[in-house]
Amino acid sequence: MSSQHNSLSLILRSIAQECQQRRRRLNVRMLIGTFVVLAVAVPAVFCWHQHQLHRICVALLDYADRMESEQRWKEAADGLYRYWKIRPEAEALGRLAQNYDKAEVTRDRQGVIGSYQRAVGVLPRRTDLRNRLCELLVQERQYGLALEQVEKVLLRHPEDKSAWKSKALASLGAYHQGQPMAIEDLRATLE
C-alpha cells in the first residue's frame, strides 16, 4: 500500500510540475506587433475608403451633368439622389428638385412639391426654387401654402415679377375657395 501511495504522490507531483510549466504568459512581442499593424492598417483603410468615396461622388456628378446636358432628367435626378445620399449637400438637393420636376416620367406632383420643400428648407435664399414651389402649390390648389412661400420671396426681393404673379394667382384662388380676404388687398395684389 505504501508503494501505491508513493507512486500516486509521484504522479501528482509530476502533474503539478507540468501545470506550472504550461501556465499561460502574455506574448508581449505579439501584442506590440498587433498594435503596430493596426496603427498602420486602420488609417490606411480609412484613407482608401475616403479616396474611393471621392471618386464615386465625382463619377455621379459627372453622370448627372451629362444626363442634364442630354435632357434626360430622370437619370440626372437618379445620379444626384445617389450623390446626395453619400454627401448630403444643399446644392445637390436643389438640383435634385429641379431635375425631378423636369422629368417627363414624374407625374407625382406631391413628390415634386416635397422635394422643393426640402430644397428651400436648406437653401432659403434660392428664390428660383421657392418661386417654382409657389407655382406648383398654386397648380395643386394649395393656396395658403403658396401664399406663405411667396411672402418669403417678396420679403427679400419685392421686385420679383414671378413672385407677384404667384401671389396674385394664390390670392385669387384662396378668395374663390372662400378664405376671407380684404378686397383691397386682393385688388392691390392683382395690380
Image: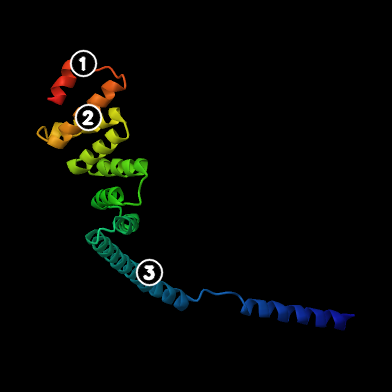
State the CA–CA distance, disc 2 to disc 3: 59 Å
How many marks the image carries: the answer is 3
In the figure, 146 relative to 11: above or below?
A: above
Which residue bears the numbered disc 3? 42
Amino acid type indicated by mark 1:
Ala
In the figure, 40 relative to 75: above or below?
A: below
Which residue bears the numbered disc 2? 169
Amino acid type indicated by mark 3:
Val
Residue 29: percent from the left, percent from the top? 45, 78
Mark 3: which secondary structure? helix
State which tag comes first along the sequence, 2 or 1. 2
Viewer-side residue, 7 vs 161: 161
Residue 57 vs residue 5: left or right?
left
* Other-residue count near label 1 (Cα within 10 Å), few / some / many at <14 / 14–19 / ≥20: few
State the CA–CA distance, disc 3 to disc 1: 67 Å
* Other-residue count near label 3 (Cα within 10 Å), few / some / many at <14 / 14–19 / ≥20: few
Instruction: Name the residue furthest right.
Output: 1
Q: Quadrant of the C terminus?
A: top left
State the CA–CA distance, disc 2 to disc 1: 15 Å
Mark 1: which secondary structure? loop
Q: Quadrant of residue 77?
A: bottom left
Viewer-side residue, 21 vs 95: 95
Which residue bears the numbered disc 1? 182
Amino acid type indicated by mark 2:
Leu
Residues under numbered marks 2 and 1 in contact, where contact means CB atoms less than 8 Å apart: no
Residue 184: percent from the left, percent from the top? 16, 16
Residue at the location (23% across, 41% down)? 132
